Amino acid sequence: MQSGSSTTSSASELKVAIITSSYHDNITGELSRGAETAFLEAGGLPEHCIHVQAAGAWELPVLAKQLSQLNQVDAIVALGCIITGETTHDQVIGNAIAQGLMNVSLDWANPVSMGVLTCQTIEQAEARSSSTSSNKGREAMRAAINTAVTLKEFRQ
């Protein structure tokens, strides 16, 4: 069993779900494309990548919970974008989403990878969602794949 590898494990035998917030869709759409690209590059099959739209980032945990209960995927990648405003609302939302996604992952015992950007400006979000290798959707999918493969190894 390998651990600590910086390469992405094979996704050839995995099914994944990508939940994408519709809010800031120019950003989240790029995150979703990055996640799907990472899945396919890792050997995942297009028909094993389910896409689900969320109204906003706040809805990501409840959709992840429902998907986990269906038990039809090996991993979930939750994608969204929260931009800092004039109040601390972004911190409240970000913390609640992170906790909600972590709870789903722990209850389900499978990866729920969080690719929710929490940026101070739209320019920062654009930089983190560009089509380059620094796309956080790609990173979230790679983490989900690696964790799902490791868990499958544990369970053998």
Image (cartoon, helix red, strand yellow):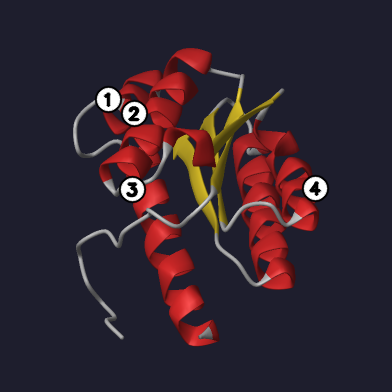
Q: Is residue 66 left or right of residue 144?
A: right
Q: Secondary structure at mark 3?
A: helix
Near mark 4 (Cα within 10 A), the count class, few <14, some 14-19 or many ≥20, is few
Residue 65 is situated, as x and y percent measured from the top left of the image, at: 77, 52
Q: CA distance from mark 4 to mark 1?
A: 29 Å
- Which residue is painted at 48% across and 24% down in the image? 28
Judging depth in this view, the residue of 103 and 73 nearest the camera is: 73
The residue singled out by tag 1 in the image is 130
* Label 2, label 1: how far apart the Cα atoms are: 4 Å
Of the residues shown, which amino acid type is indicated by label 3?
Glu
Q: Residue at x 60, y 66 (%)?
A: 110
Instruction: Name the residue beneath numbered marker 4.
Output: 66
SS class, disc 2:
helix
Mark 4 vs mark 3, CA separation in Å = 23 Å
- Local crowd size for mark 2, using a 10 Å CA cut-off: few (<14), some (14–19), many (≥20): many
First reached walking from the N terminus: tag 4 or tag 2: 4
Q: Look at the image and tell me whether residue 36 can be seen.
A: yes
